[in-house]
Amino acid sequence: MKIVLTEVPFTKDRDMSVEKSCLPEGAELVVAVYDEHAEDNSEFYKLIEDADIIVNSYVYFGKKEIDTLKKCKVISFQSTGYNEVDMDYATEKGVAVCSILDYCTQETAENAFAMMLCLQRAIRIYDRSVQVDKEWNYLAAQHLQRIEGQTMGIVGLGRIGQSVARKAKGFDMNVIAYDPFLPPEIAENLGVKLVDLDTLLAESDVVSIHMNLTKDNYHMFNKETFSKMKKKPWIINEGRGPMICEDDLVWALDEGLVRGAGLDMLESENPDLSECKLLGRDNVLLMPHCGYFSDTSDYLVSKLSMENGINYFLGNYDQVKVVRNNVKH
């Protein structure tokens, strides 16, 4: 059994001791690094060619990558999402795709709320004023608004969205949500009003995004949707980067259609920051897709993704957390 951990440059040196501890006797663990900015990734393709199991986070598996896999049975994602794969082509080629149901709900919800608080309370501006500018001035930031009574609009009321809703309720915010797939009784039990997307965009002081990426919601937030935001809201993204068109967000910020943004990810998982137009703005908070991260979640994501891949390979399908396509060997 050959298991390949597919990594990108910023993850290649991480601690992989948990993955190693999950290895069955006689199994081989190999690390393959893909750099989307490199001219030559031939070593990556050579290493994945004879993999039985791929354990993946940030490398996109399109037709070229899937065609390279000569005997792989399963791609196991170290995430709840699974957008880094051409699902239709993987299914056509008989490669199963697995992900993890729940390992970082609280961390991600906490991070979303932390970004919202940091932006609304101008924490970064005040901290810089004191520590860098050596000024003790409460007027360093202007136009702060009381959070109590604001409307939080949650896009995607799954586990993370529900946790964010409970936290917003604790701050005495009004909470509405858009989720066309959610049973209404779940929202009702949370005290959350389900609305259509246009209503959410028009009524929200904060728009917090918590959907997995699909073909249908790629660039869901664009010039058209930003133009429907009547209250100039704060945008928080803990979903997936490509749900927001970055160029259109820059436009909306420049036009004053949104007050600011807290983004836990950008469109690319390995962005060229020298080209990023969102940098250098006091009203934009950027984080390197770390909202999920804690010692607890890091252990769980490593352990569960390895167990998913190994159990699927061995035919223990009932022990796999989530199978995203209907492929069995």
Image (tube, grey):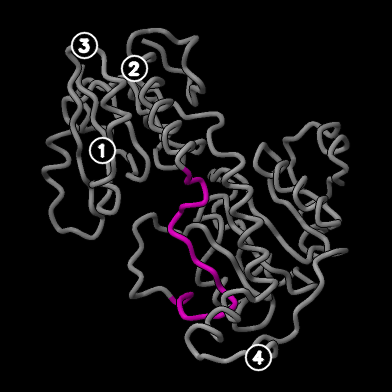
Residue type at mark 2 is Ile
Q: Magenta span covers which residues?
A: 277-294
278 part of magenta stretch: yes
Q: Is residue 94 visible?
A: no
Distance of mark 3 from mark 2, alpha carbons? Answer: 12 Å
Q: Position of residue 190 (x, y in %)?
A: 84, 39
Q: Mark 3 or 2 closer to N-term?
A: 3
Residue mark closest to the camera, 3 vs 4: 4
Distance of mark 1 from mark 2, alpha carbons? Answer: 20 Å
Q: Is residue 237 left or right of residue 142?
A: left
Residue mark closest to the camera, 4 vs 2: 4
Q: Which residue is mark 1?
A: 65
Question: Residue drawn 52% across and 51% down?
Answer: 291
Mark 4 near mark 2, Cβ–Cβ under 8 Å? no
Mark number, residue 25: 3
Residue mark closest to the camera, 1 vs 4: 4
Residue type at mark 4 is Asn
Residue type at mark 1 is Glu
Residue mark closest to the camera, 3 vs 2: 3
Q: Mark 1 or 4 closer to N-term?
A: 1
Residue mark closest to the camera, 1 vs 2: 2
Secondary element under disc 3, as helix, strand or loop, is loop
Q: Which residue is mark 4?
A: 137
Neighbour tally class for label 1: few under 14, some 14-19, many 20 plus, Cα within 10 Å: some
Q: In the rendered image, which quarter is residue 93 located in?
A: top left
Q: Is residue 22 above or below residue 101?
A: above
How many labels sit on residues? 4
